Image (cartoon, helix red, strand yellow):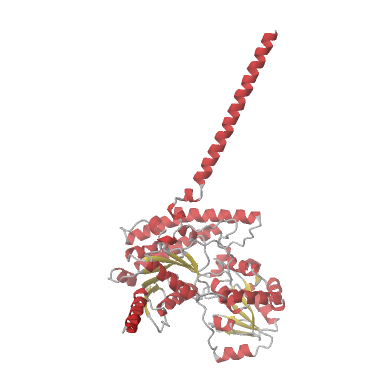
């Protein structure tokens, strides 16, 4: 009887720990949804009651747990091959890029809040314990946590960055923490100058332009909600898609938790044609994919032909994610696929190199499977990811403007022939796999932790209670400068009085002598 009572108590405690979680992932990029879906499905399988808002209906819901889709029917749909060519983003000035991201973010927020399915949810009697929001230029959506009186968890699809660091008072000195699109060597003075300018420009943009616009959109739907400058700083937890094996060490406040690689699954059996193709590659295979958002079909003709010429000279086979039926000038050693199971391909021992756009998912997957990379970054965090992979000795990168036949051939042959890249990547792979707990278990633990401790106020750093000028100790600097100037003035005045007195005494002495 006592044993049954104990078992019942354990089961009851387990049930009461399970949470009602709302996940909001409005970004139309497929890679963003892959991460959001992986996180929410993982939490559902941990026993939580999960509801997900996104532009994509889930085709493969978890077999365990509760998982409910709310599809953004009125929202911007994923791009197809005839839409805006994202390769053009490489040529956009950084300030124009900031303003463009503002516009995209305002569209995400407005589109989400106005969607009929979302409005139906907001008017329902549904309750949630936790609201998870993807932090991607959509800060106004944090109002969901206020509306449902739930704990706010922020999910960052790449490493800690300027979009989230100030919101949890996480230290991020521009002297060595690079901004997006920045290839930065901290030892280079001018790199630090440029990175600092970009950091200041980003902060001014967010605080003077973006946050006020987001607040206006939010107030349109929630007129009685607190201002965004209150809601923005209420996150109980930040889940960061990074790991020490792929990202340089940077500061982390207690509320920030690394879960990089949580979306990576054990390799599955490949389709028969791919399995045979990879198995038969005696010299190895080069896998080429520009990710799910960028599409190889949109590459400019001159760059595509340069890539084809380099691939045609290789003794290795090439597996290319190509989003069309045919590829003009396709060499015999190149196999195409509109969609390819990337993780399962990278797990095959015959894959010797991965030519990638440098998206963080691709970098994480290549590190996990120990495949050296040649990154061709175009926009966003891709340059930063590519530079860190090269800094770790795990591959090379070529800036998009510098991509041509000569640069690609030299870099790719170097990776294929020099064993150091493969060895370094395997070292990093061991580091990524050497964890006390699985990343999804870490996310699950900390979500339960903030629920158990009523939002986890003990994780908040004191910096969140300070206005920006106090956080940056500008008031202290101003005080010290004032004290220094006053001291200098007093010393100057004192010396001036002494000199004047000495001069008077000298004159009196002369008069007496005369």
Q: Quadrant of the N terminus?
A: bottom left
Residue drawn at the location 41% of the way across and 78% of the way down: 46
Please provide percent x and percent y for residue 21: 37, 72
Residue at the image point whose x is 44% and y is 76% from the top = 37
Residue 128 makes an appearance in the image: yes
**Quadrant of the rendered structure where residue 344 is?**
bottom right
Q: Quadrant of residue 502?
A: top right
Provide residue 431's location: percent of width, then percent of height: 59, 74
Residue extending furthest toward the front: 2
Instruction: Decide: is 21 above or below 482.
Output: below
297 and 440: which one is in front?
440
Q: Nearer the viewer, residue 493 or 285?
A: 493
Q: Position of residue 162 (x, y in %)?
A: 51, 60
Q: 452 or 309, which is in the foreground?
A: 452
Image point 36% across, 56% down: which residue?
A: 227
Which quadrant: the C terminus? top right
The answer, for residue 290, to whether it is visible in the render is no
- Establish if 35 lies above or below 315: above
In this view, which residue lies farthest toward the top?
514
| Location of residue 494 by image quarter | top right
Number of numbered discs on residues: 0
Residue 249 percent across, percent down from the top left:
58, 64
Horizontal side, residue 169 vs residue 18: left or right: right
């Amino acid at each position: 009887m006592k044993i049954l009572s104990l078992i019942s108590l354990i089961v009851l405690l387990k049930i009461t720990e399970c949470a009602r979680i709302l996940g909001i992932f409005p970004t139309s990029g497929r890679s963003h949804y892959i991460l959001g879906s992986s996180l929410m499905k993982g939490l559902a399988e941990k026993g939580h009651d999960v509801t997900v808002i996104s532009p994509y209906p889930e085709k493969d819901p978890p077999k365990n747990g509760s998982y409910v889709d709310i599809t953004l029917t009125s929202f911007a749909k994923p791009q197809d091959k005839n839409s805006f060519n994202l390769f053009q983003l490489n040529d956009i000035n950084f300030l124009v890029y900031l303003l463009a991201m503002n516009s995209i973010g305002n569209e995400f927020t407005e589109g989400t809040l106005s969607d009929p399915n979302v409005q139906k949810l907001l008017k329902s009697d549904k309750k949630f314990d936790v609201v998870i929001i993807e932090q991607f230029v959509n800060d106004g959506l944090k109002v969901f946590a206020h509306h449902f009186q739930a704990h706010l968890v922020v999910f960052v699809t790449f490493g800690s960055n300027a979009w989230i660091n100030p919101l949890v008072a996480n230290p991020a000195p521009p002297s060595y923490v690079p901004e997006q699109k920045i290839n930065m060597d901290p030892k280079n003075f001018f790199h630090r100058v440029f990175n600092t300018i970009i950091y200041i420009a980003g902060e001014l943009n967010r605080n003077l332009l973006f946050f006020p616009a987001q607040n206006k959109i939010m107030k349109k739907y929630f007129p009685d909600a607190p201002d965004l400058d209150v809601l923005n700083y209420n996150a109980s937890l930040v889940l960061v898609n990074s790991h020490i094996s792929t990202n340089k060490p940077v500061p982390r406040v207690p509320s920030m938790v690394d879960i990089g690689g949580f979306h990576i699954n054990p390799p599955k059996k490949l389709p028969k044609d791919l399995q045979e193709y990879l198995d038969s590659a005696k010299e190895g295979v080069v896998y080429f994919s520009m990710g799910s958002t960028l599409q190889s079909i949109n590459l400019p003709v001159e760059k595509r032909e340069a890539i084809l010429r380099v691939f045609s000279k290789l003794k290795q086979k090439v597996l290319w994610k190509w989003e069309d039926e045919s590829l003009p000038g396709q060499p015999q050693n190149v196999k195409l696929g509109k969609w390819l199971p990337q993780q399962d391909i990278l797990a095959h021992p015959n894959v010797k190199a991965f030519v990638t756009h440098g998206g963080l998912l691709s970098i994480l997957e290549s590190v996990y499977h120990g495949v050296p990379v040649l990154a061709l970054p175009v926009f966003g965090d891709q340059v930063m990811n590519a530079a860190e992979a090269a800094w770790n000795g795990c591959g090379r990168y070529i800036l998009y403007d510098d991509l041509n036949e000569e640069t690609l051939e030299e870099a790719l042959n170097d990776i294929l022939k020099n064993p150091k890249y493969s060895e370094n990547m395997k070292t990093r792979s061991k580091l990524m796999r050497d964890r006390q707990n699985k990343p999804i278990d870490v996310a699950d633990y900390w979500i339960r932790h903030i629920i158990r401790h009523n939002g986890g106020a003990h994780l908040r750093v004191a910096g969140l209670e300070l206005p920006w000028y106090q956080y940056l100790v500008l008031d202290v600097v101003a005080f010290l400068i004032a004290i220094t100037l006053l001291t200098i003035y007093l010393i100057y005045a004192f010396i001036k009085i002494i000199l004047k007195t000495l001069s008077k005494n000298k004159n009196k002495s002369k008069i007496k002598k005369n």
